[in-house]
Image (cartoon, rainbow, N blue to C red):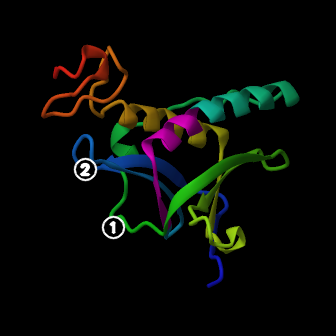
Amino acid sequence: MSAKEYDLKPVSRITTGAIGPQGQRVFYIQARKDEEIITLIVEKQQVQSLAIGLEQFLADLDKRFPDLSNAEAVYIEDEMELEKPIDPVFRVGHMRLGYDDENDLLVLVAREIQADDNDPEAADVARFWCTRSQLRSMCAWGLEVASRGRPICGNCGQPIDPEGHFCPKRNGHKH
């Protein structure tokens, strides 16, 4: 089966979100260009890592292109919600960032997760071309969504389930 490529250049909207109860949420990245909507499944850690990586990437861009305008993270919560129907095209294995200095656009490249025995060239790929502000806003929103999960145990750093928490640092005693 040949790989599919999705290329939204430029996006009119990009967001992230999560659906489901705490501890069982599924995270998504969703982009729109005109009538085309592409939704991808991601892990919570991927959303968090993307936000950190974007800040580092933007800092590098500022050094390379000192005349770039500031990219603000401005969003309205209601406008960042995922659009329905939620119909993901694939689960993301790897993401990377690029920059088109001629058009001042960032590109978020997401590659489908593949089983070890599959040909990496057969993986589907999505490219979302965004302004620096669009992607920074999406990442800021993604961190907000990720923070709405289960509280973290102060002893072991693991999430606390609603039914309680088996903490190895408390010799197995529940919270």
Q: What residue appears at the point 65 percent right and 77 percent down from the top-left corner?
A: 3
The quarter of the displayed image where residue 79 is located: top left
Q: Relative to 57, is 4 above or below?
A: below
Asked whether residue 66 is in view, the answer is no
Q: Toward the viewer: 163 or 61?
A: 163
- Image quadrant occupied by the N terminus: bottom right
x and y percentages locating residue 19 in the rendered image: 29, 51
Give me the C-alpha separation between circle 1 and circle 2: 15 Å
Q: Residue at x 15, y 29 (%)?
A: 164
Residue 39 on the magenta segment: yes
Q: Position of residue 151 (x, y in %)?
A: 27, 25
Residue that sits furthest to the bottom in the current view: 1
Residue 95 placement (x, y as % from top left): 63, 50
Which amino acid does the dot numbered 2 rest on? Gly
Corner quadrant of residue 127: bottom right
Residue drawn at x 30%, y 32% is 148
Q: How many marks?
A: 2
Q: Which residues are magenta?
A: 37-51
Q: Which quadrant of the structure image shows residue 173?
A: top left
Asked whether the viewer can see residue 61, the reply is yes
Mark 1 or 2, nearer chain start? 2
Q: Amino acid at mark 1?
A: Pro
Disc number for residue 20: 2
Residue 15: where, in percent of width, then height?
Answer: 47, 48
**Image quarter (top left, top right, bottom left or bottom right) of the C terminus:** top left
Judge whether residue 144 is colored magenta: no
Mark 2: few, some, or many residues within 10 Å (few <14, many ≥20)? few
User: Image height check: is 15 above or below 90?
Assistant: above
- Residue under circle 1? 85
Label 1 packing within 10 angstroms: few (<14), some (14-19), many (20+)? few
Left or right of 58 in this view: 63: right
**Mark 2 residue element:** loop
